[in-house]
Amino acid sequence: MQKIKNICCIGAGYVGGPTMAVIAQKCPDINVTVVDINEQRINSWNDPDFSKIPIYEPGLADVVKDSRDRNLFFSTDVDAAIEKADIIFISVNTPTKTYGIGKGMAADLKWIELCARQIARVSVTDKIVVEKSTLPVRTANALKSILENTGNGVKFQILSNPEFLAEGTAVADLMAPDRVLIGGDVATKEGRTAIQTLVDIYANWVDKDRILTTNVWSSELSKLTANAFLAQRVSSINAMSELCEKTGADVNEVARAIGMDSRIGSKFLKSSVGFGGSCFQKDILNLVYISKSLGLNEVADYWEQVVIMNDHQKNRFAANIVKTLFNTVSGKKITFLGWAFKKDTNDTRESAAIHVADFLLKEHANIVVYDPKVTADQIYKDLDYLEGNDLETIKKLLTVETDPYKACENSHAIAVLTEWDEFKTYNWQSIYDNMLKPASVFDGRNILDLDKLKAIGFNVDGIGKP
Ligand code: NAI
């Protein structure tokens, strides 16, 4: 079997960066080069100050520190890295299409195709190309036909190796994954050899019985299925949260009771203002689109409901703030604790906070945001991106604070949008003393001790609480 000396990863994002940093640390004999067309991102990965790498994940800076400039490199020279590589991971973005056929549903594979064409153009030696991005089932066919028609005799093997890490725990997940999934052309000897080559890399730190191999289509579809199932659990418990609020039940109690059933399990049963992140919604919509394209309308409708429920949860959280504050928030100061889509990440893509802010800004609220890891720049970018928004007006209504206590001063209400641990340890008495009365807390993550807050004098509102 071919000895792997050089790995290239196209895409230095939330998946490419951490994944390759861990491979480099665990395989010191392999040179790993992560490339990106975004020069600013690459410069940040190379920042001498490791606290400034572009992605915040617990433990990531230390892993990067371990290998950077030894066998882990970040570069904008995509051609050079492709040319040298034995294995190329494609880890570029695959967002929902915003134009043309499949708009708002299908995955936009523009960046994937550009990568394939670049690999085809540059390669002069045989290579294994690995789909790390989440892709619609059967995308490997498209890659294959682009790569096989170069006419220069170079041979490519295409593998699917979807990433199951969760942001916020990316390093821990990569170090000890529940499983690694590798799909390839199991019907040919070359295909099986390529699969084994990738298995051997992971086997440097992952137990062999946690490395699953299968055919490409099962691997591609497993990733979409995993995200659909995870998101479906969140929407299911969120649907019950609304019922709890109307019936006097407590969603945490219900989750505890059903979670002890070993067939259901206790994880991923936390009710909240709704799921966010770059993956769940995009991957489910993609699944819906694929199902519809195949004429499977009932399958499509079933999964689409997960996204519909999530949108409903975000809207009803925002609408409840307006209703509770005497049906108007115009000119009222509302403090957002948290902007990231979950704790321990600076990723804000599809964060529930964006949608709640948009809703309240349309009601002319004044919003002050505090998040321990998200910059003001990013917050304004997120809102500017929404259709019909004007950044100048937004900047007059929404400000960003770096001190949480200051953010809460003279405010009418606090909305918890991210479950950062530090929010639990604040001096809530002092926050209450400096707010306007009546002072309200809307806990969109069910992390605060609402009885304690009530005793201080707050009006409190949790998700799925009587
Ligand atoms: P990202 O947006 O953070 O990173 C993608 C990077 O690819 C960007 O920096 C972009 O500049 C770069 N890029 C795009 N086209 C390029 C090209 N032709 N040449 C060089 N660089 C190029 O995206 P993220 O979050 O890392 O996701 C990547 C893929 O992994 C997506 O398909 C996503 O669905 C999947 N995924 C994401 C997870 C997550 O937690 N973020 C988890 C599991 C899978």
Image (cartoon, grey):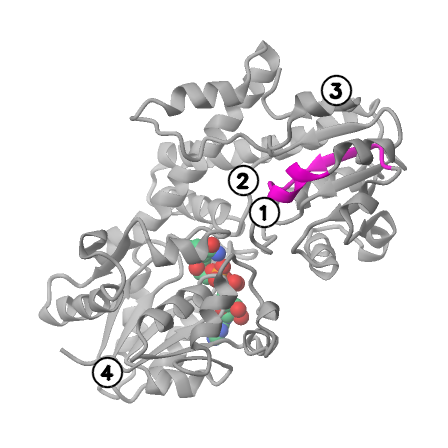
Q: Determine which residue is flagged by label 2.
A: 275
Foreground pick, 292 / 336: 336
Please state if 127 lies on the left or on the right of 12 as rendered. Answer: left
**Residue at left offset 26%, top offset 59%:** 206
Judge the density around disc 2: few (<14), some (14-19), many (≥20) Cα neighbours within 10 Å: many
Q: Determine which residue is flagged by label 3.
A: 455
In the rendered structure, find residue 126 and report the number of the disc placed on it.
4
Q: Amino acid at mark 2?
A: Phe
Question: Of label 4 and label 2, which has the lower sequence position?
Answer: 4
**Residue at left offset 42%, top offset 66%:** 91
Please state if 17 lies on the left or on the right of 202 as rendered. Answer: right
Nearer the observer: mark 1 or 4; the answer is 1
Judge the density around disc 1: few (<14), some (14-19), many (≥20) Cα neighbours within 10 Å: many
Mark pair 4, 2: CA separation: 42 Å
Q: Amino acid at mark 1?
A: Phe
Q: Determine which residue is flagged by label 1.
A: 341
Magenta stretch holds residue 312: no
What secondary structure is marked by label 1?
loop
**Residue at left offset 36%, top offset 23%:** 260
In the rendered structure, find residue 145 and report the number of the disc placed on it.
none
What secondary structure is marked by label 4?
loop
Q: Do labels 3 and 4 touch, CB within 8 Å?
A: no
What secondary structure is marked by label 3?
helix
How many marks on residues?
A: 4
Mark pair 3, 1: CA separation: 30 Å
The quadrant in which residue 425 appears is: top right
Q: Do labels 2 and 1 touch, CB within 8 Å?
A: yes
Question: Of label 2 and label 1, which has the lower sequence position?
Answer: 2
Question: Of label 3 and label 4, which has the lower sequence position?
Answer: 4
The quadrant in which residue 172 appears is: bottom left
